[in-house]
Image: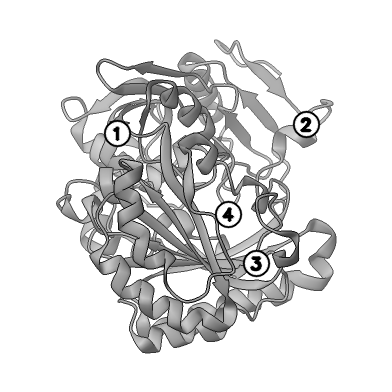
Amino acid sequence: MKINGFRGRLITADHADYDTARAVWNGAVDRRPRLIARCGGSADVAAAVRFARDHDLEIAVRGGGHNVAGTAVCEDGIVIDLSAMRAVRVDPAGRTARVQGGALWGDVDHTTQAHALATTGGIVSHTGVAGLTLGGGIGFLMRAHGLTVDNLLAAEVVTAEGDVVRASADEHPDLFWALRGGGGNFGVVSSFRFALHPVGPTVLAGPIFWAADDTTEVLRFYRDFAAEAPDELGTVVRLGTVPPLPAIPAELHWRPAVAVICCYAGAVDDGERAVRALRRFGTPLVDLLAPTRYAAFQAATDDTVLHGWHYYWKSTNLAGLSDDTIAVITDHAYAARSPRSYSAMFHMGGAVARVPQDATAYAGREVAHNIIIDGVWLPAESGKHAAAETAWARRFLQALQPHRATGVYVNFLDSDDDTGRVREAYGDRTYRRLAEVKAKYDPDNAFHHNKNIGPG
């Protein structure tokens, strides 16, 4: 098989690397594409798009391959694979970085931290830059520096016609608006240019764990603590079991617990003052909050969500942390059967909320917290855990229905049973505007193997 103008690598089912190349982060996804086109640059991406359109092939686009729904791989179509395109180039004087579309956040942090700079990225270093960015970009730096999309300055995009265009505030501004939260609906982003901020290289970061029996009291304290927290303090609440990480005493491994994970995007001394009340609350099982290298902190939980494990997600925005909401969370968080399952709650606000609602396609500016419910089990445990963890996540979400705020973070939507929630992620007004941009740049909906927005 040959693609005109393509200089990358073509992988078909008879290739020795086929099974490795088609595998994505969520091992529960098992699809067999007809062709994987591993690109070396924008010209290869454009050639692959034109080939797919000429041959009426289903198109999947792979950046980091980390989306829980497995949209990076399709059945009997073509995967336009950017995983070989991972270059990161930093302009330290201008505080910007140009990042190729197949890069992971670990690539970005590694390169930018050499200059004590960073931008808001994911909370796991093997998350793909493209998917996280295009959906909005939640991370520990967002309260100080905005979502990832708020730091996007420009993008190089291959359109459904196979043209290479630049999207920015001055060039194709409608496309630029849509890319900042509207997902992979509008083209293949071959590179991004981000604004960077002084961060680290040493930050105050890490988790504090309390026993599961203390969850109600911890969450009630956290509600008030988070409401008064400075923008520099990013926090994530994790509820599940204590992961068996080297830094955690072995006697605590797999014990049900609630953790508040912190990262202070400023001077360590200021961070110490900001977290003092949290550290003094109750009787923690272990306090691992300490000065640490930012890049190392970003990768600290990588081994708790490994490639090839099976995942099933549910998520929602929360109206607040009322006592009733906390009661629901406490009642359901520890009911999973798999010890690897967990839920996580993200504190929004700060710089995220100060961006005008219509400035980007990301629609959750007013939300204070959102929650993700992650069923996780090993491939060999599917018979034991798959149905139970899926049911647990659904029950948990259903119990939260009376306490939900409008919307859901689009990057947290799972597979088929979340398809109807795409409009919910944006709201009617933003969704209609996205559909108009879709109609202009992809009227045939060639890029539909995603959290799809149809042309309107």
419 left or right of 153? right
Q: Residue at x 56, y 77 (%)?
A: 333
Point out the tag, 1 or 2, that comes first from the N-terminus: 2
Residue identified by numbered label 2: 18
Instruction: Check the image and report above or below for 385 versus 100.
Output: below
Closer to viewer: mark 3 or mark 4: 3
Q: Identify residue type, mark 3.
A: Ser
- Measured from the top left, where is residue 236 in percent x and y? 44, 60
User: What label sits on residue 69 in the rendered view?
Assistant: 4
Q: Nearer the viewer, mark 3 or mark 2?
A: 3
**CA separation in Å, label 3 and label 4:** 17 Å
Of the residues tagged 1 and 2, which is closer to the observer?
A: 1
The quarter of the displayed image where residue 176 is located: top left
Q: Is residue 338 visible?
A: yes
Q: Amino acid at mark 1?
A: Leu
- Image check: 226 left or right of 23? left
Q: Which residue is mark 3?
A: 341
**Label located before the other in sequence (2 or 4):** 2
**Which residue type carries mark 4?**
Ala
Please identify the quarter of the rendering in which residue 382 is found.
bottom right
Quadrant assignment for the N terminus: top right
Residue 247 sits above or below residue 223 on the image: above
Residue nearer the viewer, 355 or 283: 283
In this view, the residue in front, 173 or 152, is 152
Residue drawn where x is 38% and y is 21% of the image: 115
Q: Position of residue 143 (x, y in %)?
A: 28, 51
Residue 421 is marked as none
* Element marked by disc 2: helix
Instruction: Decide which of tag 3 and tag 2 comes sooner along the chain.
Output: 2
